[in-house]
Image (cartoon, coloured by chain):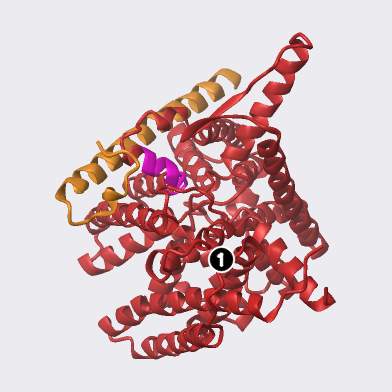
Amino acid sequence: MILRPRLDDFRVIGLYTGKVITGIGLLMLVPLVTGLCFGEWNPAVEFLIGIGACLVFGLGMEVLCQTRRDLSWSHGLVVAGSSWFVATVLGAIPHWLSGHFGSYLDAMFDVMSGYTTTGLYLLQDLDHVSYALNMWRHLLTYAGGQGIIVIALAFLFRGTAGAYKVYAGEGKDERLLPNVVRTARAIWLVSLAYLIVGSLALWVVGVGLGQSPVRGLLHAVWVFMGGWSTGGFAPQSYNMVYYHSLAYELISCTVCILGSFNFALHWAVWTGDRSEIRRNIEVISFFTTITVAMLIVTDGLLQQGVYPDSAALFRKMFYHAVSGHTTTGFSTIYSRTFVRQWGPLAMLGITAAMAIGASACSTAGGIKGIRLGILFKALIQDVRRMISPETAWVVQKWHHVTTRILDDGAVRTAALIVFAYVAIYAIGALAGVGFGYELGDALFESVSTGSNTGLSCGVTAPTMPATLKVLYIVFMWCGRLEFMSLFALVAWTAAWVRGR
Amino acid sequence: MLTHRSELLDLKNPRNYLVYGTGIAVELAAIVVLTAIGYAVAVIGVWLFT
């Protein structure tokens, strides 16, 4: 039984939620400066209003909720869950004021899609959006990829003992360094280093394609942010089709794969443990399942005879298998092409890739390779146990940064999370069918939202039913936080309402 | 080479930039190799079964 929260519990949660929202307000300074640099006065005012709202809420909570009490595990989970919701409501202010959205719900949909690195959007007339708003869209997804709690930890929190509990509540439980604040800074160090290298490479290609240096730089930074965060936002409505460039595709693909790696893996390699790349259970799992997905998609495309030559077929297949499996959502085809030309088998291959997703403690979503790896190891262990003498003690090991012995607790946790993901995929598909969409389309879109991928076969549009928009917002939220924070938030609210 | 040490966070230490560069180069090389293997398996697999 969960005890009814007391005033002091609200203070702790309010204090830390306030810190996170203050961080979001400070983050809006970047699009504000972008707007001012390009003489976009109206967007600049819209961001000033957004900053004001975030700072009033954030600093107000910090003043009202003064407490010396540290966070408990339940507080950490509730702070993580509630921060993402408040950040979505307040982060949508500049979106809504831009006039590019049909409703505030649509604006919230896009902001949640950004934070959760999903990449689906309901924004209208993307090709005429201000630089400031485009910067905010991509910054949202870049920040969301690292985790908005991680931002607050890196720059606003002092090293409290409870900080780790909020960090874990955001679906990240790796400690790159013993201190969680330093861990958050290490995550940002890796992300910023790659931001410089990746953006530079994309900028060179963009300028080579004929973009002006300034426009090329903005596109490079935005595409990098969309790829690294496995968000899939792009500055143009044609997404990656806009660039028509093999070099742009190869670089963006590489960025997606890098972004989908566990930050602990990056840190291990950077600190000298290079063998980690070939030993890590997530890397092995990822490259096994993506190879199978590529086989399925290629066979599906061959059956349909869509592409005239094998080079074009493999180029499209490879890009979308990587985009889907890393849960990025970049695309070099139009949304309806999945349904009209790719056919059911290729769509199934991409759906499966999206459902599995990439690594835990990365910017990616989905079930995650580590869980599939653990379940596969558990299956092997059971088979070995069955064929071994009764007295034999069968030990199964798995490697992720350190080599560990597989125990029932790890298997149980992995199975529960896999079950939760499969449940939201199924519920989303049923809801889609209930609203009149074809089963294949509804499943594709449901998996895309639940796994925070963002590839669309055309279901997500401003004209879709409002209930489905709300459901997708919840799925994106659940998928990104890996359920536990939301379950804690619901249980905590229920305990408060029930009064015990 | 540094091993899991927080000194890597020190941006004022020029040696750290060499570590970042080496880390990025190793990861990029690994992606190229692993992607090439996956791609080749997909091509050969489809060629065998069709």
Query: Residue shown at 66%/63% (left/top)?
Result: A74
Q: Is residue A461 above or below residue A259?
A: below
Image vertical order of residue A166 relative to residue A249, above or below: below
Closer to the camera in the image, A176 or A279: A176
Quadrant in which residue A394 is drawn:
top right
Instruction: Please say whether residue A255 is one of the residues in the magenta stretch.
Output: no
Q: Quadrant of residue A3?
A: bottom right
Per the rendering, the colour in which chain A appears is red
Q: Residue at x 51, y 66 (%)?
A: A114
Which residue extends farthest left?
A: B14
Q: How many marks?
A: 1
Observer-nearest of A261 and A458: A261
Indicate the amino acid at tag 1.
Answer: Ser
The N terminus of chain B appears in which quarter of the rendering? top left
Compared across the picture, whether A384 is left or right of A214 comes to right
Determine whether, in the image, residue A336 is placed left or right of residue A115. Answer: right
Q: Position of residue A486 (x, y in %)?
A: 68, 63
Left or right of residue A250: residue A405: right
Q: State which chain is coloured orange.
A: B
Quarter where residue B2 is shown = top left
Whether residue A263 appears in magenta in the rendering, the answer is yes
Secondary structure mostly seen in the magenta stretch: helix
Residue B40 image point, x, y percent: 45, 25
Query: Local crowd at mark 1 within 10 Å, few (<14), some, or many (≥20)?
Result: many
Q: Which residues are magenta?
A: A259-268
Asked if residue A10 shows in the view, the reply is yes
> Which residue in the protein does label 1 denote?
A113
- Determine whether the residue tagged by mark 1 lies in a helix, strand or loop: helix
Front residue of B17/B7: it is B7
Give x and y (percent) for residue A46: 43, 88
